[in-house]
Every structure is written in C-alpha cells, then in structure tokens.
Image: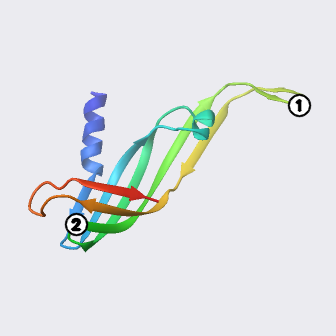
Amino acid sequence: MKIINIILLILVFSFAAFGQEYMTTLTYNVSVPAGETNQFIEAPSYLGLSFDGRKFVLPFFSVGFYTGWQVFYEQSSEPLTVKKGTLSGKQYRYINSFPIMLNAHIWIGSEQCLRPFVGINA
C-alpha cells in the first residue's frame, strides 16, 4: 500500500509544460546524502521539490535555470564526546538545501517525437 501511495504522489507532484520556445518542470524529489552531508545525516530525504525552466535558443539547444528545496532530517541518540566529557540526549539534525544552478541542454532528434538530450548544470 505504501508503494502505491508513493507512486501516486510522484504522478501528482511531477509535471512538465512545453511551449514552442519554453519548457518548465515542477518535480517531487527523493535524495540520498553524500560526502560530508552523509557524515551528519545518513537517512534519505523524501521531502524535496524542484523547479526547472528552459528556453530554446536554437531548435536543438536550450539554456535555463534549476532551483529546488531539499530537507534532510534525522533523529539520533548518539553520544557526543567533547574536551571535558561526553554529552548525551536526543539530537534533531536538519539540513535545508537550496540549490540554484544555470543549465544548458543539447537535444537530439526532431521536435515531433521522443527527444533524448544531454545537459549540464553549474
């Protein structure tokens, strides 16, 4: 039952709008922490939302931006060692991530069919 609810949420909260020159996408995201974030919070995040806007400057090339909001959360009872002793208790760890990036994409194929693309965000 939980899998069905997750699939329904993904279908409801993910959509794309295409125009002749513009494309926008609003997406529900699931993220897994990596690097230093993983040392602080190990749990995956199911609280994410992103917006992507693109403008076609050529029929095969688009530029745009990407922004989002991802909330990482974990509860821990792990003791912390400091210089003069050890601290214990419940810890509530939060990271709110707000990426803002510019992007460029090269589109392959004609506009009337399925179009794969290659892109980069920076």
Q: For this view, does 84 lie left or right of residue 120?
A: right
Image spot of residue 2 (x, y percent): 31, 29
Question: How far is mark 2 from mark 1, CA to CA?
Answer: 59 Å
Query: Tag 1, which secondary structure?
Result: loop
Where 85 sits versus 107, above or below? above
Q: For this view, does 70 lie left or right of residue 87?
A: left
Amino acid carrying label 2: it is Phe
Query: Tag 2, which secondary structure?
Result: loop
Q: How is the image coloured?
A: rainbow
Image spot of residue 40 (x, y percent): 63, 36
User: Which residue carries the number 1 mark?
Assistant: 83
Q: Sequence-wise, which precedes: disc 2 or disc 1?
A: 2
Q: Nearer the viewer, mark 2 or mark 1?
A: 2
User: Which residue carries the number 2 mark?
Assistant: 60
Image quarter of the N terminus: top left
Amino acid carrying label 1: it is Lys
Mark 1, other Cα within 10 Å: few <14 / some 14–19 / many ≥20: few
